Each structure stands twice: as C-alpha cells, then as structure tokens.
Image (cartoon, helix red, strand yellow):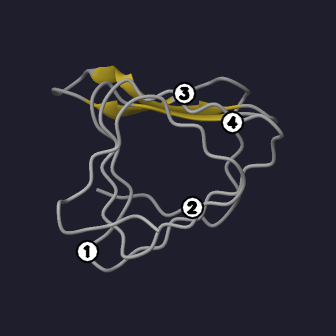
Amino acid sequence: SSTLFDEDIQFVSSKKIYWAGSPGTFDSSVSIYGSTTNFYIEAPSYIEIGDEHPTNLEIRLVSEDLTIDMETKVDMNAPLLELSGDLDIEGDIDMADTKMGK
C-alpha cells in the first residue's frame, strides 16, 4: 500500500525514519534523520543515489576546512570531474596505462 501526503511532514529532531525488515520488525541500521543543522543517511554497507536515467548529483558544501574520510573504495565513473583549489592526496593514484594526467 502507499500513502500520499499533501502537507509538510515535520519530525522531532533526531527521530529516525527506518525501513521494514522481516514482517513486524525494522532494520535500525538503515535510517534517515536530522536536526535543524544536520542531516544523516545511515546504511551499514551501501548507499546508492541514482535512478534508471542519468542523474545529476550536486552537493554544495560551504566550509573552509572539509575532511572526507573514506574507509573503503570510492569509484567515480564520470566523463569529467572538476575540482578547484588545493587537492592533498595521501597514497597512490592509479590510472589506466593509456591515460595521462594534465
């Protein structure tokens, strides 16, 4: 079944939205929650943003110091990846043998 909301939905700060697990249970490891200043999406292994058609994802971050901690692999398949400012990379950068950086 489905529910159609035609009004805003307001949640109490830090209360989570969970997804159903087996009948009558909820998987507390997968949730969305937030407050007036933060927004969180939690999943134990995989978060996918997209759809069956090409999807644009734009993230605007306003910060003078941004740290992104990746405990696993980041796989980006994009015809163009634009970065500006200083980029400090620790570790190896692997490129295909037929590609050259500019």
Quarter assignment of residue 13: top right
The residue carrying mark 3 is 16
Q: CA distance from mark 1 to mark 4?
A: 30 Å
Q: Secondary structure at mark 2?
A: loop
Mark 4 crowdedness (10 Å alpha carbons): few <14, some 14-19, many ≥20: few
The residue drawn where x is 60% and y is 60% is: 83
- Contact between marks 1 and 4 (CB within 8 A): the answer is no
Q: Earlier in the sequence, mark 2 or mark 4?
A: 2
Give the left or right position of residue 98, taking residue 70 as reference.
left
User: Looking at numbered disc 4 in the image, what kind of residue is underneath it?
Assistant: Phe
Give the left or right position of residue 88, taking residue 52 as reference.
right
The residue carrying mark 4 is 11
Q: Earlier in the sequence, mark 4 or mark 3?
A: 4
The residue drawn where x is 68% and y is 60% is: 84
Marks 2, 4: nearer the viewer: 4
Q: Position of residue 31 (x, y in %)?
A: 45, 30
The residue carrying mark 1 is 52
Q: Earlier in the sequence, mark 2 or mark 1?
A: 2
Q: CA distance from mark 2 to mark 1?
A: 25 Å
- Contact between marks 2 and 4 (CB within 8 A): the answer is no
The numbered disc on residue 5 is 2
Mark 2 crowdedness (10 Å alpha carbons): few <14, some 14-19, many ≥20: few
User: Looking at numbered disc 1 in the image, what kind of residue is underneath it?
Assistant: Glu
Marks 1, 3: nearer the viewer: 1
User: Looking at numbered disc 3 in the image, what kind of residue is underneath it?
Assistant: Lys
Quarter assignment of residue 12: top right
Marks 2, 1: nearer the viewer: 1
Q: Earlier in the sequence, mark 1 or mark 3?
A: 3
Q: Secondary structure at mark 4?
A: loop
User: Looking at numbered disc 2 in the image, what kind of residue is underneath it?
Assistant: Phe
The residue drawn where x is 67% and y is 49% is: 9
